[in-house]
Image (tube, rainbow, N blue to C red):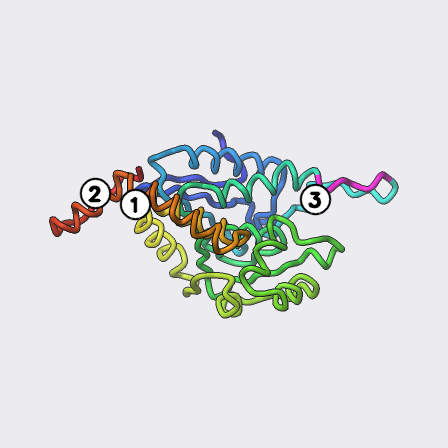
Amino acid sequence: MDYQNIIVTEKNGVGYLTFNRPKQLNSFTEAMHKEVAATLKAWSKNADIRAVVISGEGRGFCAGQDLNDRVVDPNADAPDLGLSIEKYYNPMIKTITEMPKPVICAVNGVAAGAGANIALACDLVIAAKSASFIQAFCRLGLVPDSGGTWFLPRLVGRAQAMGLALLGDKLSAEQAQQFGMIWQVVEDDQLQAEAEKMAEHLAKQPTYGLSLIKKAINTAAHNTLDEQLLLERDLQRLAGRSEDYREGVQAFMQKRTPAYKGC
């Protein structure tokens, strides 16, 4: 695919997707959505890609929707913003959360609007110290989308989520870590190296088992304890039948490094 809006590389079992519209703070257009969707869907099915890193080029991670890509004419009928949510943003969030491999987000700068919530949809978020998160929707009279109203209260609690969504204040990377929104904050010049190190570590792990962990934690938010206990039983049954589990046990007994295959 001839990418115009993203940079795609694959190395050591890791797929790297970098939003590449730096002059527009990597805000989304329809064309960019199509490129991102095609890449993520391909990686979901590619057994050779065992971990994914999403980042942004330039001084911003992603400023959400490019408003210049939408014509809002005061003399015309009101736009149906739900159409772009249904067609592009919702499928992207579902692809990230349902991808059967770890997805790391490396936030290199401002993550605003949908950009902030794309980051929160990822499994692990590493942010540069200069990065920030803004639920900017309220400034335009809009509702947080891309899973924002689902992720935020579960990550930071109702009070913090309500404040972030209603006030639209900028949250620094260090504040986001303190709130429990993200995993790690690193020096700006260490972001790429840390994300790569984490991704390559995960790519060498029993990724089938990691996919089951991801499924269990994502499902827990709406399960009762009894339902979750049954799910853990069922997933552990699957994990115990995997080649990775067999390899892990044999490697432990033989005092060697396991060679996992993700199955």
Point out the stretch of residues depicted in magenta. Answer: 76-82
Q: How far apart are marks 2 and 1 (CA)?
A: 9 Å
- Judging by the rendered image, the residue that carries numbered circle 1 is 206
Horizontal and vertical percent for residue 123?
Answer: 45, 52
Tell me the mark number nearer the camera, choosing from 1 and 3.
Answer: 1
Task: Judge by depth and name the residue closer to the eye, 14 or 72.
Answer: 14
Give the amino acid type for the residue marked by disc 3 in the picture.
Asn
Q: Residue 232 appears at what percent x and percent y?
A: 40, 49
Callout 2 crowding tier (Cα within 10 Å): few <14, some 14–19, many ≥20: some
- Indicate the position of residue 256 as horizontal and vertical percent values: 14, 49
Query: Cβ–Cβ below 8 Å for labels 1 and 3?
Result: no
Secondary-structure class at tag 1: loop
Vertical arrangement, residue 208 with respect to residue 147, above or below: above
> Around disc 3, counting alpha carbons within 10 Å, would you say few (fewer than 14), some (14 to 19), or many (20 or more)?
few
- Tell me what residue is drawn at x 55 percent, y 62 percent: 132
Q: Which residue lies furthest to the front in this view?
A: 226
Dot 2 amino acid type: Glu
Q: Is residue 94 above or below residue 25?
A: above
Badge number at residue 68:
3
Mark 1: give few (<14), some (14-19) or many (20+) Cα within 10 Å. many
Q: Is mark 3 on a helix, strand or loop?
A: helix
Query: Which quadrant would the C terminus be assigned to in this image?
Result: top left
For this view, does 141 lie left or right of residue 216?
right
Asked if the residue at tag 1 contacts the one at tag 2, i.e. Cβ–Cβ closer than 8 Å, the answer is yes
Q: In the rendered image, which residue does mark 2 sit on? A: 247
Counting residues from the N terminus, which is met first, the one under dot 3 or under dot 2? 3
Name the amino acid, label 1.
Pro
Query: Which residue sits furthest left?
Result: 254
Which residue appears at 66% of the width and 42% of the height? 85
